[in-house]
Image (spheres, rainbow, N blue to C red):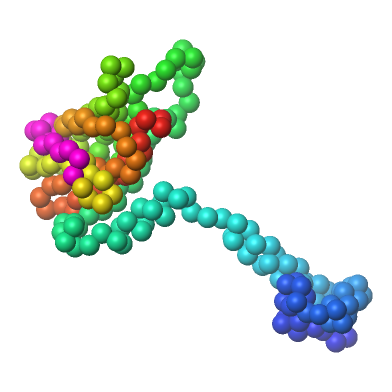
Amino acid sequence: MEHFSEQRLVDFVRGVSGPKIGREVREHLATGCSKCKTSHEAWKRVRRMAAEDSAYAPPENLVRMAKLEFSITAERSPQKWTLANLVFDSFALPLQAGVRSGTVNVWQVIYEAEGLMVDLRFGRSSQSSEVHVVGQVFDRQAVRPLRNNATVELSTETVQLVTTAAVTEQGEFQLEFEPRDHLWLSIKAAGRNAVRIPLTNPAER
């Protein structure tokens, strides 16, 4: 029994083999040829996987962050930096039964990078539109708060400074700012890359 080539089966699965070849392939598969049937099923799976992959698109905020990382010039950001990884988000946790009907005014996130653990707690006052951030930076290797004259800077994605604060001996800092989109928090300490954290607009939480 004559078998069809892989190229003929690929064209058939893609629907570009033409009416005559398509009819011949269908008739051949109808005879029960196990070799061609196996190849046909394999290429159908490949075709299905390719179609599914093309339906996926990365989140817009990740695309924006990736573009920003490559677009910032050395003149704008002379210090090397590392994008922090989110390891905890209080909004991802289910609310306890006693607070499901109430309003949650505090949002906590924890990030990790460059051997540092950054704990951030966001809050908003009912009398003001400003966002209050209380944070603490830990050196994971030394198992203690970060103490080497670290500073925290809040800036826009175009590296325009919004506000800054010094990190205390206890590794703590506080910031207040008007909520807006596309803000970045940077922790800068001697001997390390700056740690950068993209901030979701707390007003949208």
**Residue 135 coordinates in the image, percent (x, y):** 22, 32
Q: Is residue 136 left or right of residue 49?
A: left
Tell me: residue 158, above or below residue 35.
above
**Residue 23 coordinates in the image, percent (x, y):** 88, 77
| The quadrant where residue 41 appears | bottom right
Tell me: residue 164, above or below residue 50.
above
Tell me: residue 161, above or below residue 120.
below
Residue 162 lies in the magenta-colored region? yes
Residue 115 visible? The answer is no
Q: Is residue 56 left or right of residue 9?
A: left
Q: Which residue is at a point 49% across and 14% down the rendered structure image? A: 101
Q: Is residue 203 left or right of residue 19?
A: left
Give the extent of the magenta segment. Answer: 161-171
Q: Which residue is at a point 21% across and 30% down the rendered structure image? A: 176
* Nearer to us in this view, 70 or 137: 70
Residue 28 lies in the magenta-colored region? no
* Nearer to us in this view, 17 or 33: 17
Residue 148 visible? The answer is yes
| The quadrant where residue 108 appears | top left
**Residue 192 coordinates in the image, percent (x, y):** 16, 52
Q: Furthest-bottom residue in view?
A: 2
Quadrant in which the N terminus is drawn: bottom right
Quadrant in which the C terminus is drawn: top left
Q: Which residue is at a point 16% across and 61% down the rendered structure image? A: 75
Q: Which residue is at a point 30% across and 57% down the rendered structure image? A: 69
**Residue 45 coordinates in the image, percent (x, y):** 70, 65
